[in-house]
């Protein structure tokens, strides 16, 4: 009766167990699965809020425009007010110093000599006016 006192008899004496007991691991995984199934719908629930949109670009003010008209006789008009040719350089120089600088729109009659128009454009360039445009009227449909 020498071999009567152990679990499994003499066959497994001194050898390590070859199988891993996976029951506790499966139990833990099932518990975690149940917890995730319960909490997952709670994580997707959110409150919708309309947040204000911010812009990082500065708002630029549109500069004023100056309309410089020349009629067929060569007379000058500053925003539809008549003035003399001698005042042109000083008016353009004072407008060129403004920040932001206004745009100069030239409006000339069909009968205006090109020389008069060239003198006005040269005076604007000398004064430092950076933006110069021509105003035209579209043809009338017949």
Image (cartoon, rainbow, N blue to C red):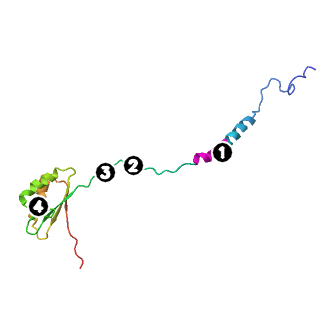
Q: Is residue 41 magenta?
A: yes
Of callouts 4 and 3, which one flags the residue occurring earlier in the amino acid sequence?
Answer: 3
Question: Which mark, by number, is residue 118?
Answer: 4
Which residue is disc 1 drawn over? 38
Q: Residue furthest top?
A: 2
- Residue at 9 percent across and 63 percent down: it is 116
Task: Tell me if residue 24 comes above or below residue 58 in the rendering.
Answer: above
Of callouts 4 and 1, which one flags the residue occurring earlier in the amino acid sequence?
Answer: 1
Of callouts 3 and 2, which one flags the residue occurring earlier in the amino acid sequence?
Answer: 2
Secondary structure category for the residue under label 2? loop
Q: Give the alpha-carbon distance from disc 1 to disc 3, as whole Å.
A: 50 Å
Which residue is disc 2 drawn over? 54
- Residue at 63 percent across and 44 percent down: it is 39
Of callouts 1 and 3, which one flags the residue occurring earlier in the amino acid sequence?
Answer: 1
Secondary structure category for the residue under label 3? loop
Q: Is residue 100 left or right of residue 27?
A: left
Q: Is residue 16 magenta?
A: no
Give yes or no for contact between labels 2 and 4 (Cβ–Cβ under 8 Å).
no
Relative to the observer, which residue lies in front, 7 or 128? Answer: 128
Mark 4 closeness class: few <14, some 14–19, many ≥20 residues within 10 Å: few
Q: Give the alpha-carbon distance from disc 4 to disc 1, as whole Å.
A: 83 Å
User: Can you give x and y, in whole percent of width and height, for residue 37 in the image?
Assistant: 66, 45
**Which region is colored magenta?**
35-44
Magenta: main secondary structure equals: helix
Which residue is disc 3 drawn over? 59
Q: Give the alpha-carbon distance from disc 3 to disc 2, as whole Å.
A: 12 Å
For the C terminus, give its image quadrant. Answer: bottom left
């Amino acid at each position: 009766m020498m071999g009567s006192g152990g679990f499994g008899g003499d066959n497994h004496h001194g050898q390590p167990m070859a199988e891993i007991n996976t029951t506790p691991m499966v139990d833990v995984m099932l518990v975690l699965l149940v917890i995730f199934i319960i909490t997952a719908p709670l994580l997707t629930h959110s409150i919708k809020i309309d947040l204000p949109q911010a812009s990082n670009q500065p708002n630029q003010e549109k500069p004023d425009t100056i309309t410089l008209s020349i009629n067929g006789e060569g007379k000058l008009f500053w925003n539809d007010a008549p003035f003399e040719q001698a005042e042109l350089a000083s008016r353009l120089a004072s407008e060129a110093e403004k920040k932001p600088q206004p745009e100069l729109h030239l409006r000339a009659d069909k009968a205006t000599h090109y020389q008069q128009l060239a003198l006005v454009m040269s005076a604007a360039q000398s004064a430092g006016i950076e933006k110069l445009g021509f105003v035209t009227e579209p043809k009338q449909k017949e």
